[in-house]
């Protein structure tokens, strides 16, 4: 395992929100990403996006050393699409699999703009609230993932006060929690596979552990009313 980790070829998959994407990252090469901008159809397209990224990079499947996938939090079905596809690529290629928190990947992407402040990464729960997690300026987690409903007007205190907030809830939380001094940053793009790949690459380069290819659920899935 250690020999393969010196020359990473990382295929990353992400489909936790309103887009599906696949990215390919390797040393000395710009990251390549293919996107599907839609809320649905991820299952039918995620593998095609991966094949397109591999083809553009000129990489054969057996050259992949690691497959990373966004593990949420996010859409119940979307998370399972990327994670299942990642497991399939690992079985087919012998690559090592690792899950990546989508909030951590977003915070990692935003960290160059955080200066010495903290980062709150957010994601839409699709039920009027937001998943949120607090990170240092270098994207190390400072809290567990919580769910914030703007209608509750629960104040954010301590290290959350004055943080830069990114993601789907940036503008809303900055407005509804004005007394917390949040600084919305709208320049971080929505979570995608390239962000997942870059965090996976950083973790591997630093010899950090692997996260499982399992969904990162904050709340039980809402399955809707029972059918008669």
Image (cartoon, rainbow, N blue to C red):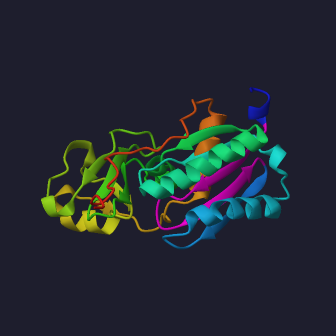
Q: Quadrant of the C terminus?
A: bottom left
Q: Position of residue 14 (x, y in %)?
A: 56, 56
**Residue 59: x %, y % from top left:** 83, 54
Return the residue nearer the eye: 11 or 163: 11
Q: Is residue 18 magenta?
A: yes
Residue 113 visible in the shown view: no
Q: Is 146 in front, or is 175?
A: 146
| Residue nearer the viewer, 132 or 124 | 124
Q: Main secondary structure of the magenta part?
A: strand
**Residue reaching furthest to the front:** 228
Judged left or right of residue 135, residue 16 is: right
Which residue is rendered at x = 68% and y = 46% of the image?
Answer: 88
* Quadrant of the rendered image containing residue 153: bottom left
Q: Is residue 158 above or below residue 114?
A: above
Q: Determine the residue positioned at 60% across, 70% down.
A: 36
Which residue of the protein is positioned furthest toward the top in this rendering? 2
Residue shown at the point (20%, 62%) measured from the top left: 150
Rendered view: 18 above or below 5: below
Residue 133 against residue 210 in the figure, above or below: below
Q: Quadrant of residue 202?
A: top right
Image quadrant where residue 1 sits: top right
Residue 160: image location, x then y, percent = 26, 48
Q: Is residue 175 visible from the viewing direction of this image?
A: yes
- The answer to whether residue 204 is magenta is no
| Residue nearer the viewer, 116 or 105 | 105
- The x and y percentages for residue 5 are 74, 33
In the image: residue 181, left or right of residue 38 = left
Q: Which residues are magenta?
A: 7-27
């Amino acid at each position: 395992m250690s020999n393969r980790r010196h020359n990473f070829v990382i295929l990353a998959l992400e489909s936790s929100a309103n887009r599906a994407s696949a990215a390919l990252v390797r040393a000395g090469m710009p990251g390549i990403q293919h996107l599907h901008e839609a809320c649905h159809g991820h299952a039918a397209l995620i593998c095609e996006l991966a094949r397109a990224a591999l083809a553009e990079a000129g990489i054969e499947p057996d050259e992949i050393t690691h497959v990373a996938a966004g593990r949420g939090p996010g859409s119940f079905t979307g998370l399972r699409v990327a994670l299942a596809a990642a497991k399939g690529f690992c079985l087919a290629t012998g690559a090592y699999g690792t899950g990546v928190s989508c909030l951590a990947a977003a915070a990692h992407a935003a960290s160059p703009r955080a200066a010495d402040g903290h980062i709150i990464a957010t994601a839409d729960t699709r039920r009027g609230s937001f998943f949120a997690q607090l990170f240092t300026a270098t994207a190390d987690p400072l809290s567990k993932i919580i769910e914030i409903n703007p209608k509750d007007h629960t104040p954010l205190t301590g290290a959350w006060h004055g943080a830069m907030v990114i993601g789907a809830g940036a503008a809303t939380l900055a407005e509804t929690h004005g007394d917390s001094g949040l600084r919305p940053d709208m320049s971080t793009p929505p979570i995608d596979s390239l962000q997942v790949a870059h965090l996976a690459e950083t973790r591997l380069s630093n010899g950090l552990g692997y996260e499982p290819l399992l969904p990162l659920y904050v709340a039980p899935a809402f399955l809707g009313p029972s059918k008669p």
